[in-house]
Protein backbone atom coordinates (compact mmCIF):
# COMPACT_ATOMS: atom_id res chain seq x y z
CA UNK A 1 0.00 0.00 0.00
CA UNK A 2 1.36 3.43 -0.91
CA UNK A 3 0.29 6.04 1.58
CA UNK A 4 1.05 9.70 1.16
CA UNK A 5 4.28 10.50 2.99
CA UNK A 6 5.27 6.87 3.58
CA UNK A 7 8.74 5.63 2.61
CA UNK A 8 8.67 3.33 -0.40
CA UNK A 9 11.91 1.27 -0.47
CA UNK A 10 13.59 0.94 -3.85
CA UNK A 11 16.84 1.24 -5.74
CA UNK A 12 15.98 3.90 -8.32
CA UNK A 13 18.20 6.87 -9.16
CA UNK A 14 16.21 9.04 -6.76
CA UNK A 15 16.51 6.44 -3.98
CA UNK A 16 20.28 6.18 -4.45
CA UNK A 17 20.88 9.91 -4.70
CA UNK A 18 23.13 11.56 -2.10
CA UNK A 19 20.95 12.91 0.74
CA UNK A 20 22.20 16.49 0.44
CA UNK A 21 21.98 16.57 -3.35
CA UNK A 22 18.47 15.10 -3.16
CA UNK A 23 17.32 17.99 -0.97
CA UNK A 24 18.86 20.52 -3.39
CA UNK A 25 17.32 18.83 -6.45
CA UNK A 26 13.86 18.67 -4.87
CA UNK A 27 14.18 22.33 -3.83
CA UNK A 28 14.91 23.25 -7.48
CA UNK A 29 11.86 21.30 -8.67
CA UNK A 30 9.72 22.88 -5.92
CA UNK A 31 10.85 26.36 -6.99
CA UNK A 32 9.88 25.50 -10.58
CA UNK A 33 6.39 24.43 -9.49
CA UNK A 34 5.94 27.65 -7.51
CA UNK A 35 7.00 29.77 -10.50
CA UNK A 36 4.77 28.11 -13.08
CA UNK A 37 1.05 28.69 -13.45
CA UNK A 38 -1.57 28.64 -16.21
CA UNK A 39 -0.28 26.50 -19.08
CA UNK A 40 2.92 26.12 -17.05
CA UNK A 41 1.04 23.61 -14.87
CA UNK A 42 1.25 21.18 -17.78
CA UNK A 43 5.04 21.44 -17.66
CA UNK A 44 4.99 20.88 -13.87
CA UNK A 45 2.70 17.89 -14.26
CA UNK A 46 4.93 16.41 -16.98
CA UNK A 47 7.96 16.92 -14.73
CA UNK A 48 6.21 15.14 -11.83
CA UNK A 49 5.16 12.23 -14.05
CA UNK A 50 8.75 11.86 -15.25
CA UNK A 51 10.10 11.97 -11.68
CA UNK A 52 7.58 9.37 -10.48
CA UNK A 53 8.42 7.18 -13.46
CA UNK A 54 12.14 7.49 -12.68
CA UNK A 55 11.56 6.63 -9.00
CA UNK A 56 9.38 3.57 -9.62
CA UNK A 57 6.89 4.93 -7.05
CA UNK A 58 3.30 4.56 -8.34
CA UNK A 59 1.67 7.97 -8.62
CA UNK A 60 -2.01 6.93 -8.59
CA UNK A 61 -2.18 5.82 -4.93
CA UNK A 62 -0.45 9.07 -3.96
CA UNK A 63 -3.03 11.09 -5.91
CA UNK A 64 -5.86 9.14 -4.26
CA UNK A 65 -4.41 9.93 -0.82
CA UNK A 66 -4.51 13.64 -1.63
CA UNK A 67 -8.30 13.50 -1.31
CA UNK A 68 -7.84 13.42 2.47
CA UNK A 69 -6.71 17.05 2.30
CA UNK A 70 -9.82 18.27 0.45
CA UNK A 71 -10.93 20.46 3.40
CA UNK A 72 -7.55 22.21 3.25
CA UNK A 73 -7.75 22.68 -0.53
CA UNK A 74 -11.30 24.05 -0.29
CA UNK A 75 -10.13 26.50 2.40
CA UNK A 76 -7.24 27.65 0.19
CA UNK A 77 -9.64 28.13 -2.73
CA UNK A 78 -12.23 30.03 -0.70
CA UNK A 79 -9.63 32.28 0.94
CA UNK A 80 -8.45 33.33 -2.53
CA UNK A 81 -11.87 33.43 -4.18
CA UNK A 82 -13.50 35.61 -1.49
CA UNK A 83 -10.69 37.83 -0.29
CA UNK A 84 -8.96 38.84 -3.53
CA UNK A 85 -9.51 42.59 -4.15
CA UNK A 86 -10.68 43.04 -7.71
CA UNK A 87 -12.41 45.63 -9.89
CA UNK A 88 -14.48 43.02 -11.77
CA UNK A 89 -16.23 41.67 -8.67
CA UNK A 90 -19.82 40.49 -9.00
CA UNK A 91 -20.39 40.36 -5.28
CA UNK A 92 -18.85 42.59 -2.62
CA UNK A 93 -19.65 43.06 1.05
CA UNK A 94 -17.32 44.39 3.79
CA UNK A 95 -13.92 42.71 3.17
CA UNK A 96 -15.44 39.93 1.08
CA UNK A 97 -15.03 40.30 -2.67
CA UNK A 98 -16.13 37.55 -5.04
CA UNK A 99 -14.68 37.87 -8.53
CA UNK A 100 -13.55 35.84 -11.56
CA UNK A 101 -10.01 36.96 -10.80
CA UNK A 102 -10.32 35.59 -7.24
CA UNK A 103 -11.74 32.30 -8.50
CA UNK A 104 -8.89 31.98 -11.02
CA UNK A 105 -6.35 32.80 -8.32
CA UNK A 106 -7.95 30.25 -5.96
CA UNK A 107 -7.80 27.53 -8.61
CA UNK A 108 -4.17 28.39 -9.41
CA UNK A 109 -3.25 28.21 -5.70
CA UNK A 110 -5.01 24.87 -5.20
CA UNK A 111 -3.29 23.34 -8.24
CA UNK A 112 0.10 24.65 -7.07
CA UNK A 113 -0.46 23.24 -3.57
CA UNK A 114 -1.56 19.85 -4.97
CA UNK A 115 1.53 19.69 -7.20
CA UNK A 116 3.74 20.60 -4.23
CA UNK A 117 2.11 17.88 -2.10
CA UNK A 118 2.68 15.35 -4.88
CA UNK A 119 6.33 16.42 -5.18
CA UNK A 120 6.98 16.35 -1.43
CA UNK A 121 5.30 12.98 -1.08
CA UNK A 122 7.72 11.70 -3.73
CA UNK A 123 10.59 12.98 -1.59
CA UNK A 124 9.31 11.11 1.48
CA UNK A 125 8.69 8.04 -0.71
CA UNK A 126 12.29 7.85 -1.93
CA UNK A 127 14.07 8.90 1.29
CA UNK A 128 13.71 7.90 4.94
CA UNK A 129 13.02 10.74 7.40
CA UNK A 130 16.57 10.39 8.70
CA UNK A 131 17.98 10.66 5.21
CA UNK A 132 15.95 13.85 4.67
CA UNK A 133 17.17 15.23 8.04
CA UNK A 134 20.70 14.21 7.03
CA UNK A 135 20.31 15.96 3.67
CA UNK A 136 19.05 19.13 5.34
CA UNK A 137 21.99 18.96 7.75
CA UNK A 138 24.43 18.70 4.84
CA UNK A 139 22.83 21.55 2.91
CA UNK A 140 22.44 23.84 5.91
CA UNK A 141 25.80 22.92 7.48
CA UNK A 142 27.47 26.22 6.44
CA UNK A 143 24.99 28.04 8.72
CA UNK A 144 26.70 26.40 11.72
CA UNK A 145 29.69 28.68 11.07
CA UNK A 146 27.53 31.67 12.06
CA UNK A 147 26.40 29.96 15.26
CA UNK A 148 23.16 28.30 14.06
CA UNK A 149 23.06 24.80 15.65
CA UNK A 150 22.12 22.95 12.44
CA UNK A 151 23.81 19.65 13.41
CA UNK A 152 22.21 19.55 16.85
CA UNK A 153 18.82 20.32 15.30
CA UNK A 154 19.29 17.43 12.84
CA UNK A 155 20.20 15.10 15.73
CA UNK A 156 17.06 16.18 17.62
CA UNK A 157 14.92 15.58 14.52
CA UNK A 158 16.50 12.14 14.01
CA UNK A 159 15.97 11.13 17.67
CA UNK A 160 12.42 12.52 17.63
CA UNK A 161 11.60 10.49 14.51
CA UNK A 162 12.89 7.30 16.13
CA UNK A 163 10.70 8.01 19.17
CA UNK A 164 7.44 8.26 17.20
CA UNK A 165 6.69 4.50 17.10
CA UNK A 166 7.74 4.11 20.75
CA UNK A 167 5.46 6.88 21.98
CA UNK A 168 2.65 5.69 19.73
CA UNK A 169 2.89 2.24 21.28
CA UNK A 170 3.15 3.77 24.77
CA UNK A 171 0.01 5.85 24.15
CA UNK A 172 -1.79 2.77 22.85
CA UNK A 173 -0.86 0.84 26.04
CA UNK A 174 -2.07 3.68 28.29
CA UNK A 175 -5.28 3.96 26.25
CA UNK A 176 -5.91 0.22 26.54
CA UNK A 177 -5.20 0.34 30.29
CA UNK A 178 -7.71 3.18 30.67
CA UNK A 179 -10.29 1.39 28.49
CA UNK A 180 -9.93 -1.78 30.51
CA UNK A 181 -10.88 0.25 33.59
CA UNK A 182 -13.79 1.92 31.80
CA UNK A 183 -12.21 5.37 31.56
CA UNK A 184 -12.60 5.85 27.81
CA UNK A 185 -16.14 5.51 26.50
CA UNK A 186 -16.65 3.55 23.31
CA UNK A 187 -19.18 5.04 20.93
CA UNK A 188 -19.73 7.74 18.37
CA UNK A 189 -20.00 10.84 20.55
CA UNK A 190 -16.76 12.45 19.43
CA UNK A 191 -16.87 15.30 21.99
CA UNK A 192 -17.24 12.86 24.90
CA UNK A 193 -14.49 10.69 23.45
CA UNK A 194 -12.19 13.68 23.03
CA UNK A 195 -12.86 14.87 26.60
CA UNK A 196 -12.21 11.43 28.01
CA UNK A 197 -8.78 11.42 26.32
CA UNK A 198 -7.66 14.43 28.37
CA UNK A 199 -6.54 12.29 31.36
CA UNK A 200 -4.22 10.42 28.98
CA UNK A 201 -2.18 13.53 28.27
CA UNK A 202 -0.30 13.52 31.58
CA UNK A 203 0.78 9.85 31.54
CA UNK A 204 1.86 10.13 27.90
CA UNK A 205 3.87 13.27 28.69
CA UNK A 206 5.45 11.60 31.72
CA UNK A 207 6.33 8.56 29.60
CA UNK A 208 7.86 10.85 26.97
CA UNK A 209 9.98 12.66 29.57
CA UNK A 210 11.09 9.37 31.13
CA UNK A 211 12.10 8.01 27.74
CA UNK A 212 13.87 11.27 26.85
CA UNK A 213 15.82 11.01 30.12
CA UNK A 214 16.78 7.40 29.39
CA UNK A 215 17.78 8.30 25.84
CA UNK A 216 19.99 11.18 26.96
CA UNK A 217 21.79 8.84 29.41
CA UNK A 218 22.21 6.21 26.68
CA UNK A 219 23.55 8.84 24.25
CA UNK A 220 26.07 10.08 26.83
CA UNK A 221 27.07 6.51 27.66
CA UNK A 222 27.82 6.00 23.96
CA UNK A 223 30.15 8.97 24.01
CA UNK A 224 27.90 11.76 22.69
CA UNK A 225 29.28 15.18 23.65
CA UNK A 226 27.60 17.35 21.05
CA UNK A 227 28.41 17.48 17.37
CA UNK A 228 31.94 18.84 17.77
CA UNK A 229 34.50 16.23 16.76
CA UNK A 230 31.89 13.72 15.59
CA UNK A 231 32.52 11.78 12.41
CA UNK A 232 29.96 12.54 9.73
CA UNK A 233 29.41 9.07 8.33
CA UNK A 234 27.84 10.25 5.13
CA UNK A 235 29.36 13.38 3.71
CA UNK A 236 28.16 14.86 0.45
CA UNK A 237 28.98 12.59 -2.46
CA UNK A 238 28.57 14.07 -5.93
CA UNK A 239 28.82 11.39 -8.60
CA UNK A 240 27.46 11.06 -12.13
CA UNK A 241 23.87 10.50 -10.96
CA UNK A 242 24.00 13.52 -8.69
CA UNK A 243 25.34 15.75 -11.48
CA UNK A 244 22.61 14.54 -13.88
CA UNK A 245 19.89 15.29 -11.34
CA UNK A 246 21.36 18.67 -10.38
CA UNK A 247 21.50 19.61 -14.09
CA UNK A 248 17.90 18.43 -14.58
CA UNK A 249 16.75 20.50 -11.60
CA UNK A 250 18.70 23.53 -12.83
CA UNK A 251 17.32 23.15 -16.37
CA UNK A 252 13.78 22.82 -15.05
CA UNK A 253 14.15 25.98 -12.98
CA UNK A 254 15.65 27.88 -15.94
CA UNK A 255 12.80 26.70 -18.18
CA UNK A 256 10.27 27.81 -15.56
CA UNK A 257 11.83 31.29 -15.37
CA UNK A 258 11.75 31.59 -19.20
CA UNK A 259 8.16 30.31 -19.45
CA UNK A 260 7.09 32.62 -16.64
CA UNK A 261 8.60 35.54 -18.60
CA UNK A 262 6.89 34.52 -21.86
CA UNK A 263 3.47 33.71 -20.37
CA UNK B 1 44.62 -3.72 33.16
CA UNK B 2 40.82 -4.10 33.21
CA UNK B 3 39.58 -2.88 36.55
CA UNK B 4 36.86 -0.99 38.36
CA UNK B 5 37.51 0.18 41.89
CA UNK B 6 35.21 2.09 44.21
CA UNK B 7 36.43 3.58 47.44
CA UNK B 8 33.98 4.82 50.09
CA UNK B 9 31.39 5.97 47.55
CA UNK B 10 28.18 7.57 48.80
CA UNK B 11 25.47 9.14 46.68
CA UNK B 12 22.04 10.64 47.22
CA UNK B 13 19.34 12.07 44.94
CA UNK B 14 17.85 14.07 47.80
CA UNK B 15 18.23 13.77 51.55
CA UNK B 16 18.55 10.00 51.83
CA UNK B 17 21.66 8.13 50.66
CA UNK B 18 21.04 5.75 47.76
CA UNK B 19 24.62 4.49 48.11
CA UNK B 20 26.40 4.48 51.43
CA UNK B 21 30.17 3.94 51.87
CA UNK B 22 30.45 1.52 48.95
CA UNK B 23 33.91 0.03 48.34
CA UNK B 24 34.92 -2.81 46.03
CA UNK B 25 37.50 -3.81 43.48
CA UNK B 26 36.82 -5.79 40.31
CA UNK B 27 39.70 -7.03 38.19
CA UNK B 28 39.13 -8.39 34.67
CA UNK B 29 38.86 -10.18 32.40
CA UNK B 30 35.93 -12.21 33.66
CA UNK B 31 32.33 -11.95 34.79
CA UNK B 32 31.17 -10.02 37.84
CA UNK B 33 27.55 -9.87 38.96
CA UNK B 34 26.19 -7.07 41.11
CA UNK B 35 23.12 -8.60 42.72
CA UNK B 36 20.43 -6.65 44.52
CA UNK B 37 16.70 -6.11 44.83
CA UNK B 38 14.94 -3.07 43.33
CA UNK B 39 16.10 0.12 45.06
CA UNK B 40 19.33 -1.41 46.35
CA UNK B 41 21.38 1.23 44.48
CA UNK B 42 23.00 -1.04 41.90
CA UNK B 43 21.85 0.95 38.83
CA UNK B 44 22.95 4.22 40.42
CA UNK B 45 26.35 2.64 41.02
CA UNK B 46 26.57 1.72 37.32
CA UNK B 47 25.77 5.31 36.28
CA UNK B 48 28.49 6.60 38.59
CA UNK B 49 30.99 4.13 37.12
CA UNK B 50 30.40 5.61 33.64
CA UNK B 51 30.44 9.20 34.90
CA UNK B 52 26.79 9.69 33.95
CA UNK B 53 26.05 11.08 37.41
CA UNK B 54 28.51 13.40 39.17
CA UNK B 55 30.41 11.68 41.97
CA UNK B 56 30.49 13.89 45.05
CA UNK B 57 31.70 11.55 47.79
CA UNK B 58 34.32 8.82 47.45
CA UNK B 59 36.40 7.74 44.48
CA UNK B 60 35.75 5.50 41.47
CA UNK B 61 38.42 4.46 38.98
CA UNK B 62 37.92 2.62 35.70
CA UNK B 63 41.10 1.11 34.25
CA UNK B 64 43.02 3.51 36.49
CA UNK B 65 41.13 6.61 35.29
CA UNK B 66 39.13 8.61 37.83
CA UNK B 67 35.51 9.35 36.91
CA UNK B 68 35.83 12.61 38.87
CA UNK B 69 38.33 13.85 36.28
CA UNK B 70 36.23 15.42 33.48
CA UNK B 71 39.15 15.08 31.06
CA UNK B 72 39.14 11.30 31.59
CA UNK B 73 35.40 10.88 30.89
CA UNK B 74 35.67 10.49 27.07
CA UNK B 75 38.32 7.76 27.51
CA UNK B 76 36.20 6.04 30.18
CA UNK B 77 33.10 6.10 27.96
CA UNK B 78 35.11 4.74 25.06
CA UNK B 79 36.24 1.79 27.19
CA UNK B 80 32.95 1.13 29.01
CA UNK B 81 29.85 0.01 27.12
CA UNK B 82 26.49 -0.08 28.88
CA UNK B 83 23.53 -2.16 27.75
CA UNK B 84 20.42 -0.75 29.44
CA UNK B 85 17.18 -2.47 30.37
CA UNK B 86 14.74 -1.07 27.81
CA UNK B 87 16.17 -1.07 24.27
CA UNK B 88 13.26 1.03 22.94
CA UNK B 89 14.57 4.04 24.87
CA UNK B 90 18.12 3.66 23.58
CA UNK B 91 17.73 3.86 19.81
CA UNK B 92 18.99 7.17 18.48
CA UNK B 93 18.20 6.56 14.84
CA UNK B 94 15.29 4.90 13.04
CA UNK B 95 17.70 2.88 10.88
CA UNK B 96 19.70 0.09 12.56
CA UNK B 97 23.03 0.69 10.80
CA UNK B 98 22.85 4.41 11.61
CA UNK B 99 22.10 3.61 15.24
CA UNK B 100 25.03 1.19 15.41
CA UNK B 101 27.29 3.86 13.92
CA UNK B 102 26.31 6.41 16.59
CA UNK B 103 29.00 5.38 19.12
CA UNK B 104 31.95 5.16 16.68
CA UNK B 105 30.89 8.51 15.16
CA UNK B 106 31.04 10.07 18.63
CA UNK B 107 34.59 8.75 19.00
CA UNK B 108 35.56 10.76 15.92
CA UNK B 109 36.90 7.71 14.05
CA UNK B 110 37.46 7.93 10.32
CA UNK B 111 34.60 6.82 8.05
CA UNK B 112 36.21 3.53 6.99
CA UNK B 113 36.74 2.53 10.62
CA UNK B 114 33.13 3.49 11.46
CA UNK B 115 31.86 1.30 8.59
CA UNK B 116 34.17 -1.55 9.62
CA UNK B 117 32.92 -1.44 13.20
CA UNK B 118 29.26 -1.24 12.14
CA UNK B 119 29.62 -4.28 9.86
CA UNK B 120 31.58 -6.25 12.47
CA UNK B 121 29.10 -5.48 15.30
CA UNK B 122 26.07 -6.34 13.18
CA UNK B 123 27.74 -9.55 12.06
CA UNK B 124 28.70 -10.48 15.62
CA UNK B 125 25.12 -10.00 16.81
CA UNK B 126 23.68 -11.78 13.76
CA UNK B 127 21.88 -8.69 12.49
CA UNK B 128 23.68 -8.05 9.19
CA UNK B 129 20.48 -8.80 7.27
CA UNK B 130 18.58 -6.23 9.34
CA UNK B 131 20.94 -3.29 8.87
CA UNK B 132 18.37 -1.14 7.04
CA UNK B 133 15.48 -2.08 9.34
CA UNK B 134 13.77 0.23 11.83
CA UNK B 135 15.05 -1.01 15.25
CA UNK B 136 11.65 -0.57 16.92
CA UNK B 137 10.08 -3.05 14.50
CA UNK B 138 12.41 -5.88 15.56
CA UNK B 139 11.41 -8.62 18.01
CA UNK B 140 12.40 -8.38 21.70
CA UNK B 141 15.50 -10.55 21.31
CA UNK B 142 16.52 -8.78 18.10
CA UNK B 143 16.12 -5.37 19.76
CA UNK B 144 18.38 -6.50 22.58
CA UNK B 145 20.95 -7.69 20.03
CA UNK B 146 20.55 -4.38 18.16
CA UNK B 147 21.29 -2.48 21.36
CA UNK B 148 24.26 -4.74 22.04
CA UNK B 149 25.47 -4.11 18.50
CA UNK B 150 25.50 -0.33 19.11
CA UNK B 151 27.50 -0.85 22.29
CA UNK B 152 29.95 -3.35 20.76
CA UNK B 153 30.69 -0.87 17.96
CA UNK B 154 32.46 1.22 20.62
CA UNK B 155 34.90 -1.74 21.07
CA UNK B 156 34.65 -1.45 24.86
CA UNK B 157 36.92 -3.39 27.21
CA UNK B 158 34.32 -3.26 29.98
CA UNK B 159 30.70 -4.22 29.30
CA UNK B 160 27.98 -3.44 31.83
CA UNK B 161 24.55 -5.03 31.50
CA UNK B 162 21.99 -3.14 33.59
CA UNK B 163 19.08 -5.58 34.01
CA UNK B 164 19.54 -5.90 30.28
CA UNK B 165 17.91 -9.28 29.79
CA UNK B 166 15.11 -9.06 32.34
CA UNK B 167 12.48 -8.40 29.65
CA UNK B 168 13.56 -11.30 27.44
CA UNK B 169 12.05 -14.77 27.23
CA UNK B 170 14.36 -17.67 28.00
CA UNK B 171 15.11 -18.48 24.32
CA UNK B 172 16.03 -14.87 23.45
CA UNK B 173 18.08 -14.62 26.64
CA UNK B 174 20.03 -17.76 25.73
CA UNK B 175 20.57 -16.32 22.24
CA UNK B 176 22.02 -13.06 23.59
CA UNK B 177 24.08 -14.85 26.26
CA UNK B 178 25.52 -17.02 23.49
CA UNK B 179 27.01 -13.84 22.02
CA UNK B 180 28.06 -12.28 25.33
CA UNK B 181 29.48 -15.24 27.28
CA UNK B 182 32.56 -15.90 25.09
CA UNK B 183 33.62 -12.27 25.65
CA UNK B 184 34.46 -12.92 29.31
CA UNK B 185 37.81 -14.31 28.17
CA UNK B 186 39.14 -10.90 27.20
CA UNK B 187 36.56 -8.39 28.53
CA UNK B 188 35.38 -7.39 31.95
CA UNK B 189 31.66 -8.19 31.98
CA UNK B 190 29.55 -6.68 34.77
CA UNK B 191 25.96 -7.85 35.11
CA UNK B 192 23.59 -5.81 37.28
CA UNK B 193 20.60 -7.94 38.16
CA UNK B 194 18.14 -9.08 40.80
CA UNK B 195 18.18 -12.62 39.41
CA UNK B 196 20.61 -14.82 41.40
CA UNK B 197 20.43 -17.43 38.62
CA UNK B 198 22.50 -15.07 36.41
CA UNK B 199 25.28 -15.09 39.01
CA UNK B 200 25.96 -18.83 39.35
CA UNK B 201 28.71 -18.85 36.70
CA UNK B 202 30.27 -15.52 37.72
CA UNK B 203 33.83 -15.06 38.92
CA UNK B 204 32.78 -12.53 41.55
CA UNK B 205 29.40 -11.72 43.07
CA UNK B 206 28.71 -8.43 44.85
CA UNK B 207 25.50 -8.35 46.85
CA UNK B 208 23.89 -5.00 47.56
CA UNK B 209 21.15 -4.15 49.99
CA UNK B 210 19.77 -0.68 50.74
CA UNK B 211 22.76 1.11 49.22
CA UNK B 212 25.42 -0.99 50.94
CA UNK B 213 27.55 -3.92 49.89
CA UNK B 214 26.81 -6.84 52.17
CA UNK B 215 28.98 -9.46 50.44
CA UNK B 216 31.65 -9.54 47.77
CA UNK B 217 33.05 -12.99 47.16
CA UNK B 218 33.01 -15.87 44.71
CA UNK B 219 29.53 -17.22 43.87
CA UNK B 220 29.93 -20.45 45.82
CA UNK B 221 30.50 -18.55 49.05
CA UNK B 222 27.77 -15.97 48.51
CA UNK B 223 24.95 -17.71 46.64
CA UNK B 224 24.96 -20.76 48.94
CA UNK B 225 23.95 -18.51 51.83
CA UNK B 226 20.21 -18.38 51.31
CA UNK B 227 19.70 -16.50 54.60
CA UNK B 228 22.00 -13.71 53.36
CA UNK B 229 20.22 -13.55 49.99
CA UNK B 230 16.76 -13.55 51.55
CA UNK B 231 17.79 -10.77 53.95
CA UNK B 232 18.55 -8.68 50.82
CA UNK B 233 15.17 -9.67 49.26
CA UNK B 234 16.92 -11.83 46.66
CA UNK B 235 15.51 -15.23 45.71
CA UNK B 236 18.31 -17.84 45.93
CA UNK B 237 19.11 -19.89 42.82
CA UNK B 238 16.88 -22.91 42.18
CA UNK B 239 19.61 -25.42 43.14
CA UNK B 240 20.11 -23.68 46.48
CA UNK B 241 16.37 -23.58 47.19
CA UNK B 242 16.17 -27.26 46.33
CA UNK B 243 19.15 -28.04 48.58
CA UNK B 244 17.42 -26.25 51.49
CA UNK B 245 14.17 -28.12 50.91
CA UNK B 246 15.99 -31.48 50.77
CA UNK B 247 17.99 -30.63 53.87
CA UNK B 248 14.74 -30.08 55.80
CA UNK B 249 13.85 -33.65 54.89
CA UNK B 250 17.24 -34.87 56.08
CA UNK B 251 18.82 -35.27 52.64
CA UNK B 252 22.26 -33.70 52.28
CA UNK B 253 23.28 -32.89 48.70
CA UNK B 254 26.28 -30.66 49.53
CA UNK B 255 26.37 -27.12 48.06
CA UNK B 256 25.14 -27.27 44.46
CA UNK B 257 24.75 -23.95 42.62
CA UNK B 258 23.66 -25.14 39.21
CA UNK B 259 21.13 -27.68 37.95
CA UNK B 260 23.97 -29.86 36.71
CA UNK B 261 25.61 -29.91 40.15
CA UNK B 262 22.29 -30.64 41.84
CA UNK B 263 21.55 -33.46 39.41
CA UNK B 264 25.02 -34.96 39.97
CA UNK B 265 24.58 -34.73 43.77
CA UNK B 266 21.17 -36.43 43.60
CA UNK B 267 22.47 -39.30 41.46
CA UNK B 268 25.44 -39.94 43.75
Image: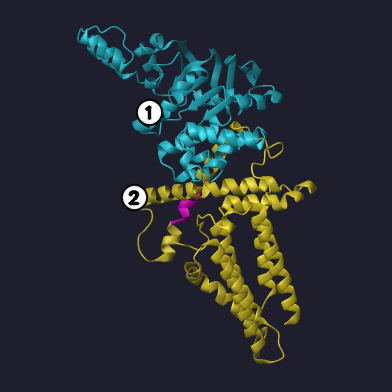
Residue at 69% in and 68% down:
A31
Q: Are marks 1 and 2 on the same chain?
A: no
Q: Which residues are magenta?
A: A197-203
Which residue bears the numbered disc 2? Answer: A180
Which residue bears the numbered disc 1? Answer: B174
Instruction: For the N terminus of chain B, give its image quadrant.
Output: top right
In the image, residue B46 sits, relative to residue A245, either above or below, namely above
- Spot occupied by residue A27 in the image (x, y as percentages of width and height): 67, 62
In the image, residue B11 sits, relative to residue A187, either above or below, namely above
In the image, residue A218 sits, relative to residue A85, either above or below, namely above
As helix, strand or loop, the secondary structure at mark 2 comes to: helix
Q: Which chain corresponds to the colour cyan?
A: B
Magenta span: chief secondary structure = helix
Residue A217 visible in this rendered orientation of the protein: no
Return the chain for callout 1. B
Residue at 40% in and 34% down:
B167
Amino acid sequence: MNLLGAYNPGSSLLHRLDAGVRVIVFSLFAASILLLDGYGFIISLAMLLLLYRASGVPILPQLRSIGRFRAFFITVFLMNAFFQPSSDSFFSWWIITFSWRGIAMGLRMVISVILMVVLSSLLTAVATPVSIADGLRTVLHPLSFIGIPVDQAAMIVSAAISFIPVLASESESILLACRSRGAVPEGKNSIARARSLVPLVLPVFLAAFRRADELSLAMEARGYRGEKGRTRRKGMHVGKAEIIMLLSGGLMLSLSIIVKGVL
Amino acid sequence: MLSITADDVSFSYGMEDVLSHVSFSIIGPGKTVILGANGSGKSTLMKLIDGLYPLRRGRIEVNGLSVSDSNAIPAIRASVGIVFQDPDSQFVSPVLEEDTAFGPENLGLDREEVERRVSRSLELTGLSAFRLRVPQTLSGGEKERAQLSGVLALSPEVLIFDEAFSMLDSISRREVMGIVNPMRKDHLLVFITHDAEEAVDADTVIIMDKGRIIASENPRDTLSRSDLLRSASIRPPFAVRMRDALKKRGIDVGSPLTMEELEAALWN
